[in-house]
Image (tube, rainbow, N blue to C red):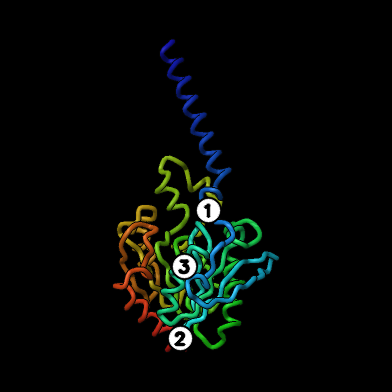
Amino acid sequence: MKVARKMTTWAVSLLGVYVALCALAWAFEKRLVYFPGPKPTHTPREYGLEHEELVVKTKDGQSLGAWFLPASRPRVAVLFCHGNAGSIEDRIEKARALLELGANVLLFDYRGYGASSGAPDESGTYLDAEAAYDALARRCAGLPIVLWGESLGGAVAIELALRRPIAALVVESTFTSVVDVGRHAYPWLPVRWLASLRYDNLAKIGGLAAPVLIAHSPADELVPFEHAERLFAAAREPKTLLETSGGHNAGGPLFDPACHPALDDLFTTAATAR
């Protein structure tokens, strides 16, 4: 009997700890997903790049920090939706690579990131992308718009592609859903029941008609390559699966010259489909 009571006490204690961990994961969900960086202290001009500083207004009243970078001979305009950490300051070199590929670029920070007001959430990031798209469309009338989504930004870009007309979509290191990422990172938690954030890309990508390029590294330690394969299988033609190298934060296709021909082809297709 004493042994049974002791085992019951241990079981109840372990269950209590598990429930407490689940409660913490639920309470701090947004802190586990969003890692906003501070207001930028460096600008593209310090990297030798011409740019215009913008304040983009969302329809729910937030003010977003943004930079517009013009290419010398633009053939497309790229709206760059960055990942879940840092700010636009950390994407200046990626903007440089896009400029060299003949793209005007708009970098913007989600609400709560960089100089932007508010706090991030799923519906808010979608509204932020809408506002940034509209700002880019006004400045680049006549140029086809390509959406570029980096990691979490891929989820933002996929949703935006359902709301606005685009010429092409690029997603790099992007997941099937936040729930699937959570299950990979915390297999011992009932993530599907705890998560309020979804970013369900797998359910959405099949609804896109524009050309899609999915770039992902088999060595990605945060988002397994399987996510890219599943997204690719669900996407409609025309579509491309581009294997990159390195870990999740290695830089992706823009920093890999071997990937540039595929990007150049996509931009050429977008530019000639007007």
Residue at the location (41% across, 79% down)? 100
> Can you give x and y, in whole percent of width and height, for residue 88 in the image?
53, 65
Q: Nearer the viewer, mark 3 or mark 1?
A: 1
Q: Is residue 187 left or right of residue 158?
A: left
Mark 3: secondary structure: strand
Neighbours of disc 2 within 10 Å: few (<14), some (14-19), many (20+): many
Q: Is residue 35 left or right of residue 170?
A: right
Relative to 45, residue 34 above or below:
above
Relative to 94, residue 137 above or below:
below
Q: CA distance from mark 3 to mark 1?
A: 16 Å
Q: The residue under label 2 is which amino acid type?
A: Arg
Residue at the location (67% across, 70% down)? 57
Neighbours of disc 1 within 10 Å: few (<14), some (14-19), many (20+): some
Q: Which mark is residue 35?
A: 1
Instruction: From the image, tell me which residue sits under label 2.
Output: 75
Q: CA distance from mark 1 to mark 2?
A: 33 Å
Q: Which mark is residue 149?
A: 3
Neighbours of disc 3 within 10 Å: few (<14), some (14-19), many (20+): many
Mark closer to the chain start, 1 or 2 = 1
Q: The residue under label 1 is which amino acid type?
A: Phe
> Can you give x and y, in whole percent of width and height, for residue 7 in the image?
43, 19
Q: The residue under label 3 is which amino acid type?
A: Gly
Judge whether residue 176 can be spotted in this image: yes
Residue at the location (38% across, 63% down)? 251
Q: Which mark is residue 52?
A: none
Residue at the location (53% across, 61% down)? 87
User: Who is closer to the viewer here, 92 or 183?
Assistant: 92
